[in-house]
Amino acid sequence: MDVLEIIRSLAPEFREAIVLREIEGLSYQEIAEVLNIPRGTVESRLYRGRAELRRKLTGY
């Protein structure tokens, strides 16, 4: 399985946060502004999205 396929399989709210942070290199505050959500929500989505990525990549 390709890493991009795994990213695409994430829930949209996790996927967009991961892409903006890890691929686009935006700061947490910039992501909050782009998505029009609180910074704490960005942190939560990144935490959950990364956890899901780790789970899906186990044994890869």
Image: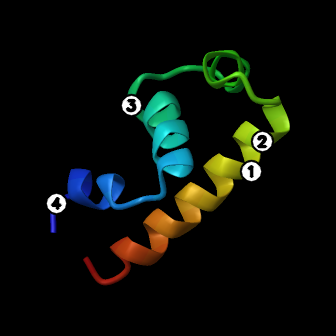
Q: Which mark is residue 41?
A: 2
In terms of sequence position, does the residue under pointer 4 or pointer 2 come before the other? 4
Going from the N terminus, do you reach mark 4 or mark 1 first?
A: 4
Q: Residues within 10 Å of mark 1 (few under 14, many from 20)?
A: few
| Residue 37 in picture, x, y percent from top left | 75, 29
From the image, tell me which residue sits under label 1: 44
Q: Earlier in the sequence, mark 3 or mark 1?
A: 3
Secondary structure state at the residue bearing disc 2: helix
- Disc 2: CA contacts within 10 A as few (<14), some (14-19) or many (>=20): some
Residue drawn at (43%, 36%) of the image: 19
Q: Which residue is mark 3?
A: 23
Percent of width and height locating residue 24? 42, 23
Tag 4: amino acid: Asp
Q: Is residue 29 left or right of residue 21?
A: right
Judge whether 25 appears above or below 46 on screen.
Answer: above
**Residue identifier under label 4:** 2
Q: Nearer the viewer, mark 3 or mark 2?
A: 2
Inter-mark Cα distance, 3 to 1: 18 Å
